[in-house]
Amino acid sequence: MRDDLTEADTLARLELGLRRMPKRRREIFLAVQVEGMAYEAIAERTGISVAEGEQHFAEALVQLHETLHGGAPVSRRRRLCRWLAAMIGR
């Protein structure tokens, strides 16, 4: 996260990022992060594959990163690292 943002600014940007996400991506992100659901349960609930759920979650992380950092794109290498970290942390 950016060091120059206040907590209120950070929360406002996160909220904006969540609101701008496609509905399914937002739902999957919140299911993983807030509800602590496994990708298998998300796949069952949404009717998508586990891989699709993982992809939606990874895309949500990238989108939130870009929102927090003023639209600065995330490199492909960094995206891969974030995706791997998400997979390890589940």
Image (cartoon, rainbow, N blue to C red):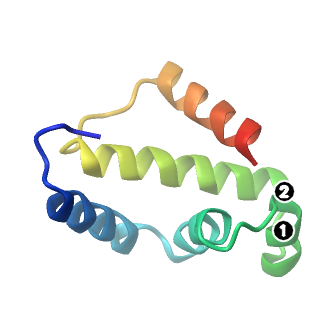
Q: Is residue 12 left or right of residue 43?
A: left
Q: Amino acid at mark 1?
A: Ala
Q: Is residue 17 left or right of residue 8?
A: right
**Which secondary structure, mark 2?**
helix
Residue under label 2: 50
Q: Residue at x 52, y 70 (%)?
A: 26
Q: Is residue 80 left or right of residue 45?
A: left
**Which secondary structure, mark 1?**
helix
Label 1 with label 2: CB-CB less than 8 Å:
yes
Q: Amino acid at mark 2?
A: Val
Q: Which residue, as the protein is rendered here, is positioned at the far front?
A: 7
Q: Residue at x 86, y 70 (%)?
A: 41
Query: Cα distance, mark 1 to mark 2?
Result: 5 Å
Circle 1 crowding by C-alpha within 10 Å: few under 14, some 14–19, many from 20 = some
Q: Residue at x 58, y 26 (%)?
A: 81
Circle 2 crowding by C-alpha within 10 Å: few under 14, some 14–19, many from 20 = some
Quarter of the figure with residue 35: bottom right
Q: Position of residue 31 (x, y in %)?
A: 66, 71
Q: Is residue 75 above or below residue 53?
A: above
Q: Position of residue 16 (x, y in %)?
A: 27, 68
Please tell me the numbered disc located at residue 89. none
Q: Is residue 87 above or below residue 63?
A: above
Residue under label 1: 43
Quarter of the rendering occupied by the N terminus: top left
**Depth order, front residue of 39/24:** 39
- The first of marks 1 and 2 along the sequence is 1
Quarter of the figure with residue 39: bottom right
Q: Position of residue 60 (x, y in %)?
A: 50, 55
Q: Position of residue 89 (x, y in %)?
A: 71, 42
**Depth order, front residue of 15/89:** 89
